[in-house]
Each structure stands twice: as C-alpha cells, then as structure tokens.
Image (cartoon, rainbow, N blue to C red):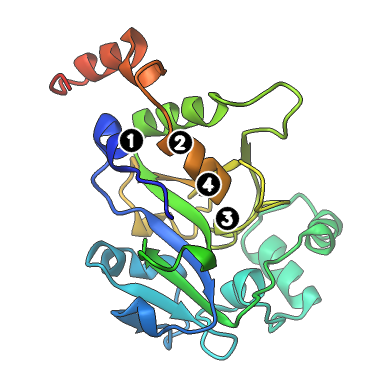
Amino acid sequence: MQPDPTNLLYRLDITTPLIGFYDAPDPEPFQSMVDETKGGCVFDHVQEWYQGKTLHLTPEKHGCRGAGRSICGVESFPTEQLVDFLVDKEGLKASKELMLEWVKHSRPYKPIHGHILIGPLKPGQEEYLRTVTFIVNPDQMSALTTGAQYFSHPTDAPPVVSRFGSGCSLFVAFDNLDIPQALIGATDTAMRENLEPDQLLFTVTKPMFKRLCELGENSFLYKSFWTGLRKARGLPDL
C-alpha cells in the first residue's frame, strides 16, 4: 500500500502534485497519457502533470536523445558526439577527457518493463513505482532535507545527495533504489525554464518516501524552527 503523504503535504504547504516515475509492463492504468512524439524535453510536460496527465515514454518514443540514454535504455547518442556537444557547445565540464570519464562512469537507468510513465501518483500501481518527486520552493526543500535525515544513522548511506546530470536522469540517479535516499533535482539549467524561478525538485526512493510520510508530532514539523519560518513567511498557523 502506498504511504499517505497528506499530512506531510499539509504541514509543508505543498500544493503541486507529487510526480511518480513508473517502470510498468502495461501503460493502460495510467490514463490520461501523453506520448512523447516531438523530441522535446521531459519537462516540457510539467503543466500536463499539473492537469493530471502522465507522460508515456518508450525506447521508440523517448523524446530527446538525452532522455533516451538516461532513462529509456537507448544509446542513440554516439559517445564522441555526446561529449563534443556537452563540452564544446554547452561547456559543462572542464575538458572532453573529464566529460568522457564522467560518461563512462555514469549508469543510465535500464528499464525493466519497457514503459516509462512520469506523472501524478497512481493508486494501485505501487509495484511499478521507482521514485517520487516533490516540486518545491527553497523553504519546502529545507524541510524535506531535514525530514530525510530524521531517521538516518551516521553509518547509513547519505540521506540526501546532489548529482551532475540531465534533469530527467535525476529522477532515477540513485546507486540503489531500495534504500532510503533523496536527491536534489532541477539543477540542470537546460530544463529549468519549465519551472518557476523558485522551484526545485526533491526526488526520493520508495523507502525514503515512506519515512517522510511517517514524520509525526514529535518531529520538527511541529516545532519552533519550522513554525517560526512559516510565521516569517506570513503563512497561517496550522
């Protein structure tokens, strides 16, 4: 059963929909769907997510070639061409050698079932859910990063990480999707034009989503640091 985020969203004033990244064998349960046929960015579809629609990607219809490589398992971008584009055209690494090293060590997501579906959480499809993404402002980001470490031990894997990569790759850029971990997203300037200036993404694995949904009355969400910040922002008492 999917954890219930209702209280978490209420305490954080998050009104944007939570976005699920699904890897499913059958797209039918995910109506209404939008197929990517124009070769555009995954984040061109943000407004459609707000309308309750789900983006449907496959190896044959995966949008831009970056998304094909990063999340659909399609190597449609020759490595040399990819490196030239990212370094010569976009200046994202100090040298081609450094970018090539990064490309070789990156681990794109390999789909299990062939249908990647990105959109609002879909009840009954928890088996195929890989990650959950919050669309948040900086204050909400600060609360989620605090919540992510709430149950964490010093010897655990880092509860929150930040990685270099395309916006869509950061939906699943985890070493292990089965441990509680979060990733700060929307750090790719190429996709940020689809978000508001004060919006970031906070993507979590299913175990971390469960932890966040379990934050209770003993947690910081009910204490002075958070309530004081809300007061400073002119938000009403909860």
Residue type at numbered disc 1: Leu
Provide the secondary structure element on which disc 2 rests: helix
Q: Earlier in the sequence, mark 4 or mark 2?
A: 4
Is residue 46 positioned above or below 200 on the image?
below
Q: Where is residue 196 drawn, in percent x and y?
A: 30, 49
Q: Which mark is residue 204?
A: 4
Residue type beneath disc 4? Val
Percent coordinates x, y for residue 220 in the rendering:
40, 17
Q: Select label 4 or label 1 by which is in front.
A: 1
Residues at circles 1 and 3 in contact by the CB criterion of under 8 Å:
no
The reply to whether discs 1 and 2 touch (Cβ–Cβ < 8 Å) is yes
Q: Say which of marks 3 and 4 sits in front.
A: 4
Q: Of tags 3 and 2, which is closer to the observer?
A: 2
Q: Quadrant of the N terminus?
A: bottom left
Q: Which residue is mark 3?
A: 170
Asked whether the beta carbons under mark 4 and mark 2 sit within 8 Å of each other, the answer is yes
> Mark 2 — residue?
212
Q: How many angstroms separate mark 1 from mark 3 (CA)? A: 23 Å
Name which of mark 1 and mark 3 comes first in the sequence: 1
Check disc 1: other Cα within 10 Å, few if <14, some if 14-19, many if 20+: some
Alpha carbons under labels 4 and 1: distance apart: 14 Å
Q: Are the residues flagged by discs 3 and 4 in contact, CB closer than 8 Å?
A: no
